[in-house]
Image: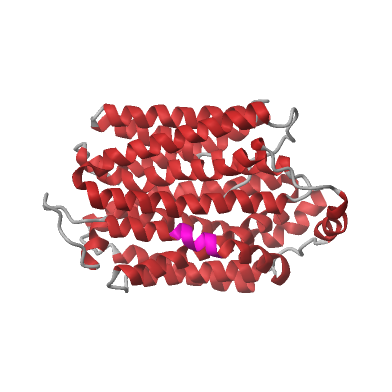
């Protein structure tokens, strides 16, 4: 064990480069939400009757991330498995540099939409590189290594508002953040090309190919389908909040809406660590799948009915904890337990559901923003409540109609 860990020390810098890529992924996934008005103005958005700029086109571009992921997931996995983690990682990181530089260079919504799709494609290729790689680098603590990819994202989303504040106080353009991240991704792409990667062990995959035909059909039961669909509802809950809380904050009188992001990130960070510990102590994954979305739904309703600034700060923390702190990953591990011979298939199905959510619900939010104007932030909360309650119902199906003994699974990480 010790000798194996020592022999893998030569890959530690590689692991750092991959975690750093996920740090920048965390920025890429949330920074557009902080600058909706600036981008809408750059793309020639109309002004609403209230005098505010129509930001619906920016929400549509953010929704394109999910479309890009949906397009790329069927291809990204085979590239990683057949051509190598290095190639998949390089493609993902290089495309993220295209996103950072491209988004500040285009001047139309449709050009930005194409860049948004590139963001999603980059996410898919990075996912299929980083999680397998860090688990191979740290084989004795693979689940913890994978968990820290989520940790890297939440840390980035925590410090981003502070970076935005520093840039604003220095009277610099927001574009400087995009330029800096783009440069860092270019450097990281070069590191991924030259740093060593652990050798892929393909023996398990070969064995699975040889034995799959003897294992029977896939277990598409009501419970397994519900577990897959939680990939949609769990992603929708935090994606809607993450990208639409800024306007809600403004309508409730929050002076610095970007600060809500920090509370959200703190909640998500604590949840990643605490949820893993709770599972080690014996709390069932299916119980968490019911409990956390229920907490999110109650908190969203409180944010709808109590129109004060303090409720949004509390809500950001709670939703960060209960929606973004591991529900998607638990849904993935639970779905895998229904497909013990096709873990890759189960993972792909959950993440495709997540990608559909990213695209569909944010497109719906953009449409609501366009047709309801100033009332949109609170109407979007109600939409989020409905989706989250559907997630609770799906989790109850998993809990009470699932296998009598689910395979105990550890937390995996996903964006």
User: Could you tell me which residue is drawn at 70 percent across and 47 percent down?
Assistant: 142
Q: Position of residue 227 (x, y in %)?
A: 61, 39
Q: Position of residue 184 (x, y in %)?
A: 46, 67
Q: Compared with residue 139, is residue 317 higher up or lower down, i.e. above or below?
A: above
Name the image quarter holding residue 11. bottom right
Q: Is residue 134 magenta?
A: no
User: Could you tell me which residue is drawn at 80 percent across and 62 percent down?
Assistant: 202
Q: Compared with residue 116, is residue 355 higher up or lower down, i.e. above or below?
A: above
Q: Main secondary structure of the magenta part?
A: helix
Residue 17 seen in the figure: no
User: Could you tell me which residue is drawn at 80 percent across and 59 percent down?
Assistant: 205
- Of 46 and 185, the residue lying toward us: 46
Q: Is residue 66 magenta?
A: yes
Left or right, residue 187 beside residue 374? right
Left or right, residue 373 beside residue 267? left
Segment tinted magenta in the rendering: 65-71
Q: Position of residue 54 (x, y in %)?
A: 21, 56
Left or right, residue 224 beside residue 181? right
Total numbered circles:
0
- Of 192 and 322, the residue lying toward us: 322
Applied colour scheme = secondary structure
User: Could you tell me which residue is drawn at 65 percent across and 58 percent down?
Assistant: 12
Name the image quarter holding residue 204. bottom right
Residue 169 seen in the figure: yes
Q: Position of residue 46 (x, y in %)?
A: 17, 61
């Amino acid at each position: 064990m010790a000798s194996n860990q020592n022999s893998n020390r030569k890959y530690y810098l590689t692991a750092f480069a991959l975690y750093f890529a996920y740090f920048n992924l965390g920025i890429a996934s949330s920074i557009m939400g902080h600058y909706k008005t600036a981008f809408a103005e750059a793309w020639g958005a109309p002004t609403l009757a209230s005098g505010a700029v129509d930001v619906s086109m920016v929400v549509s571009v953010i929704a394109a991330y999910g479309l890009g992921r949906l397009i790329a997931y069927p291809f990204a996995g085979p590239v990683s498995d057949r051509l190598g983690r290095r190639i998949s990682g390089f493609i993902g990181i290089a495309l993220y540099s295209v996103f950072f530089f491209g988004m500040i260079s285009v001047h139309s919504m449709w050009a930005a939409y194409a860049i948004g799709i590139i963001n999603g494609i980059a996410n898919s290729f990075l996912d299929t590189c980083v999680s397998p790689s860090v688990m191979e680098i740290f084989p004795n603590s693979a689940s913890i290594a994978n968990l820290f990819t989520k940790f890297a994202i939440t840390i980035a989303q925590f410090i981003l508002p502070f970076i935005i504040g520093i840039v604003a106080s220095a009277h610099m353009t927001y574009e400087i953040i995009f330029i800096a991240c783009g440069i860092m991704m270019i450097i990281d792409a070069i590191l991924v090309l030259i740093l060593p990667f652990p050798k892929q062990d393909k023996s398990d995959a070969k064995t699975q190919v040889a034995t799959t035909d003897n294992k029977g059909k896939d277990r598409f039961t009501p419970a397994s389908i519900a577990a897959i669909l939680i990939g949609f509802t769990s992603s929708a809950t935090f994606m809607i909040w993450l990208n639409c809380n800024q306007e809600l904050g403004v309508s409730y009188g929050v002076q610095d809406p970007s600060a809500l992001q920090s509370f959200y990130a703190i909640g998500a960070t604590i949840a990643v660590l605490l949820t893993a510990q709770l599972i080690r102590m014996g709390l069932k994954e299916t119980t968490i799948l019911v409990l956390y979305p229920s907490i999110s739904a109650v908190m969203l309703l409180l944010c709808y009915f109590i129109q004060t600034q303090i409720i949004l700060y509390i809500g950001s923390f709670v939703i960060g904890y209960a929606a973004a702190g591991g529900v998607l990953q638990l849904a993935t591990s639970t779905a895998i337990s229904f497909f013990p011979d096709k873990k890759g298939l189960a993972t792909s199905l959950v993440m495709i559901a997540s990608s559909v959510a990213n695209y569909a619900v944010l497109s719906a939010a953009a449409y609501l923003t366009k047709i309801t104007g100033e009332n949109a932030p609170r109407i979007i909360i109600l939409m989020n409540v409905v989706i989250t309650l559907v997630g609770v119902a799906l989790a109850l199906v998993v809990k009470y109609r699932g296998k009598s003994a689910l395979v105990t699974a550890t937390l995996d990480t996903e964006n």
